[in-house]
Image (tube, rainbow, N blue to C red):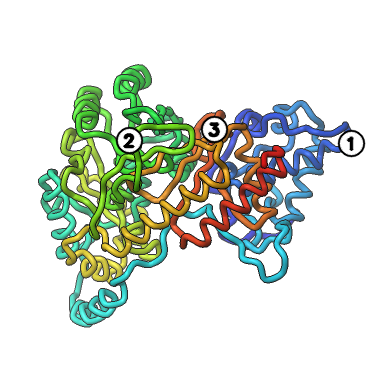
Amino acid sequence: MNGLPPLSSHATGRISAARLASLLGQWHRGGPRSGGHDLADALATRVRDGRLPPGTRLPSERELAGALGVSRTMIGAALERLRDAGLVASRQGSGSWTAAPPGVRHPGTGLPDGAELIDLTRASPGAADGLLPAFEAAQRALREALHDETYDDLGIMPLRERLAARYTARGLPTAPSEIMITNGAHHGFALALRLLAGPGDRVLVEQPGYPHAFDAVTAARGHLVPVPVDPFAASGWDIDGIAATLRQTSPRLAYLMVDFHNPTGRRMAAEDRERLGAVLAATRTHTVVDESAVELDLGGADGGNGAPDRIGYGDGGGSGDGCRTGGAPPPLAAFAPRWTITVGSPAKTHWGGLRIGWIRASEELIGRLGAIRASLDLGSPLFEQLWLAGLLTDPVPCPGPRRRALRAQRDALAGAVRAECPDWSFRTPEGGVNLWCRLPEPIGSRLAGAARQHGVLLTPGARFGVQDGLERWLRLPFAQPPDRLREAVRRIAAARAGLTGAP
């Protein structure tokens, strides 16, 4: 067994032997003597593409051997290969769990010396303009705050007031007492999950959806109940289907992203929000609404015709320097204020390194969330709160240069996919940072592995699903400069050609 693993490798959730066997699918490709090698390759692929996140505790060798119908010797040989590759850590008496893959310049890539590795696994833009002036203003404010003898566990009042004012302007009257500052939007979801759902409880989520939300539910030993989001339908969400699922399964909590959904980029229409709000109230379902991308309204695609086709979809319109607010639908919480917990952060609008966020909920729920948070931490860092408060003095929700850059990047990526992979289908998103592409073949995970050999890191569509069936999908974030995105697509097309023979 290996020695003590690094802290980042400690287990954060467990996958059952049956679920892992289903995730592996048809993993055995060769003869009887290649079983251990084939199994190690299949497990390594699912670690690298994110379907077995670092820290996932693996079943015992006996359990996995029984689920796969193979010998424990084969399981042991496969795990030994993964330990040698740094993808699995083990400890006597504690079992084995997945570990973070080695650094991005992995020797498994086919890159020549000095070539650039393009990482498309992260959908987080670089820093926006205006960060440094706000940073300097926060430094000055910090000098004054050093004389305070206490802190507010809900967050500093100026920041909560500015966030409350923004919700009010969007059609959701909000008081500062209905805001709590967190360490990011995902932190807010984790707090709600801890408060409202326990082991064995059902949690409704979208499919495709946000993988880290799935991981959080799994780590809390909850059961995921998926409802579909259709990237091409006139309305991405089937409200009647969601209502039926809520009534049939009675989940304790729901997690939705109705503004520039990750990964499809869809935005729920106002009339659907009103219907869904009524359903949530009628079924008494607490719902976390993740608004991480709500302010990244980029407008429609340039030259779009408003109708889907086999290579793209454009909605037209959208211009100007600031993110649009006129005509945007009200927050979902405006239609079910008692049952909705809204979370947000500046990670997409300003900078992913600014690890701060917020929760907007009823004052009663804020009080309960604050009480349960006290067992985990006692508040968010003061300096980051001062920094964000300074950034939010700008009345424009999303800086104009940020929006213009993202629009250019989106259009460059869409154009590159049309040129290099003309048989891929996608809908040009009106906002967010992702292009969700449908492939003609179910090769998403294999393509992610092949693209790595060409120097591109990808997250296949299967990572965004609760159940199998998303191998025909691929998420491509456009949070990088246009030239790099075009080069990434060129490499991905070359990788695909090697798999399928496509020109």
Residue 454 sits in which quadrant? Answer: bottom right
- Foreground residue among 435 and 70: 435
User: Crowdedness of circle 1 by 10 Å Cα count: few (<14), some, many (20+)?
Assistant: few
> Whole-percent x and y of residue 298?
31, 51
> Whole-percent x and y of residue 236?
35, 30
> Whole-percent x and y of residue 34?
85, 38
Residue occupied by mark 2: 306
Which numbered tag is attached to residue 33?
1
| Mark 2 vs 1: CB contact within 8 A | no
| Mark 1 vs 3: CB contact within 8 A | no
Distance CA(mark 2)–CA(mark 3): 26 Å
User: What residue is at 36 percent from the left and 40 percent from the top?
Assistant: 314
144 to the left or right of 11: left
Mark before the other along the chain sequence, 1 or 3 = 1
Distance CA(mark 1)–CA(mark 3): 31 Å
Residue occupied by mark 3: 470
